[in-house]
């Protein structure tokens, strides 16, 4: 799977955490909507935050 943009993040804490990430940072991917919520993988930040026009 290749890079994907995260758009329209409305949770202020999540937005601030995403904005603080720098290229090369590592993060956990947490799936909360499944039958067994939890960390399902790791990610590497490939681009720093840019405005998407759909956030608060």
Image: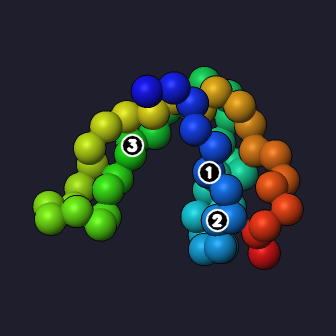
Q: Is residue 28 above or below residue 17?
A: above
Q: Quadrant of residue 43?
A: top left
**Residue occupying image coordinates x 58% and y 38%:** 4
Q: Is residue 3 above or below residue 52?
A: above
Nearest the camera: 34 or 56? 34
**Residue occupying image coordinates x 39% and y 43%:** 28
Separation (CA) of disc 2 from disc 1? 7 Å
Q: Which residue is mark 1?
A: 6
The answer to whether marks 2 and 1 mark residues whose Cβ atoms lie closer than 8 Å is yes
Secondary element under disc 2, as helix, strand or loop, is loop
Image quadrant holding the N terminus, namely top left
How far across and how far down the image is residue 24, in percent?
A: 60, 24
Q: From the viewer's perspective, is 6 left or right of 44?
A: right
Q: Residues within 10 Å of mark 1 (few under 14, many from 20)?
A: few
Q: Which residue is mark 2?
A: 9
How far across and how far down the image is residue 22, in percent?
A: 68, 35
**Residue occupying image coordinates x 37% and y 34%:** 42
How far across and how far down the image is residue 5, in percent?
A: 64, 43
Secondary element under disc 3, as helix, strand or loop, is strand
Separation (CA) of disc 3 from disc 2? 17 Å
Separation (CA) of disc 1 from disc 3? 15 Å
Residue 28: mark in rendering: 3
């Amino acid at each position: 799977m290749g890079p994907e943009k995260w758009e329209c993040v409305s949770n202020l804490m999540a937005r601030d955490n995403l904005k603080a990430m720098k290229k090369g940072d590592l993060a956990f991917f947490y799936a909360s909507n499944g039958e067994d919520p939890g960390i399902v993988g790791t990610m590497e930040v490939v681009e720093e935050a840019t405005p998407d026009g759909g956030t608060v």
